[in-house]
Amino acid sequence: MTDIEARDEERHRAKMAKRKAVQDAEVAGKTIEKGLLIVNTGPGKGKTTAAFGLALRMLGYGKRVGVVQFIKGKWHTGEKDAFAAFGDRVVWHTMGEGFTWETQDLKRDIAAAEAAWVKALELMADPSISLVVLDELNIALRYDYLDLDKVVTALKGRREGLHVVITGRNAKPALVEAADLVTEMGVTKHHFSAGVKAQQGIEF
């Protein structure tokens, strides 16, 4: 190693030591442990994918997970099949009847959303479940299929230690305000714009 390389190595080591001290102090300052209300929203791809990534992480620690799908009723998805391998450690309910432009029946859409919300409340009340994914709940709220105030109140009053992940575009401001973590998925480039159709293993 040359003298220049040795000096560079030492500077890098000193810089990283300072960085580690800052990081360690920041981590040590975090003392709260609680169930989180997480919202994945925005126009970009990956909201549900990210939620199921958390579900997989939770399963990796031996926990149980609950899933309620509010809209995607007609789609057969690979993730549902994959999670079935975990047996009763995943409680999965596909309650929607498809997107609103597919059903074209407001009363039917509202009834499906209300039934899904009842199931969501059941899962949130189950003490054996550590994480509940409410897939596309934001869509049901966007179209006023459910009472926003009642939903937010129930989510705020969930049992201690329960993590809840909500997905879907256009999250309501009241839900964003109530959440502990909100991620806005943006679109820089999307293959749909180039005429690429939804593909197995990518979109479903």
Image: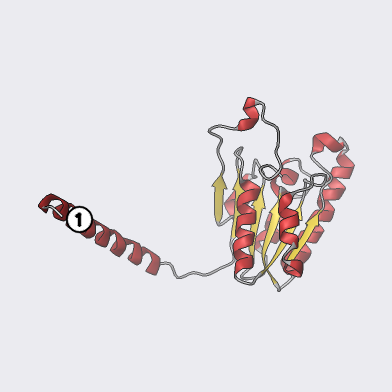
Disc 1: which residue = 9
Helix, strand or loop at disc 1?
Answer: helix
Q: Quadrant of the C terminus?
A: top right
Residue farthest toward the front in the current orientation of the protein: 1
The colour scheme applied to this rendered structure is secondary structure
Q: Is residue 19 left or right of residue 4?
A: right
127 relative to 201, above or below: below
Residue farthest toward the top in the current orientation of the protein: 194
Q: Residues within 10 Å of mark 1 (few under 14, many from 20)?
A: few
196 relative to 128, above or below: above
Q: Nearer the viewer, residue 104 or 86?
A: 86
Q: Residue 201: x percent and y percent?
A: 68, 45
Q: Residue 8: x percent and y percent?
A: 18, 52
Q: Residue 74: x percent and y percent?
A: 83, 44
Q: Residue at the spot x=63%, y=54% of the render? A: 51
Q: Is residue 87 visible?
A: yes
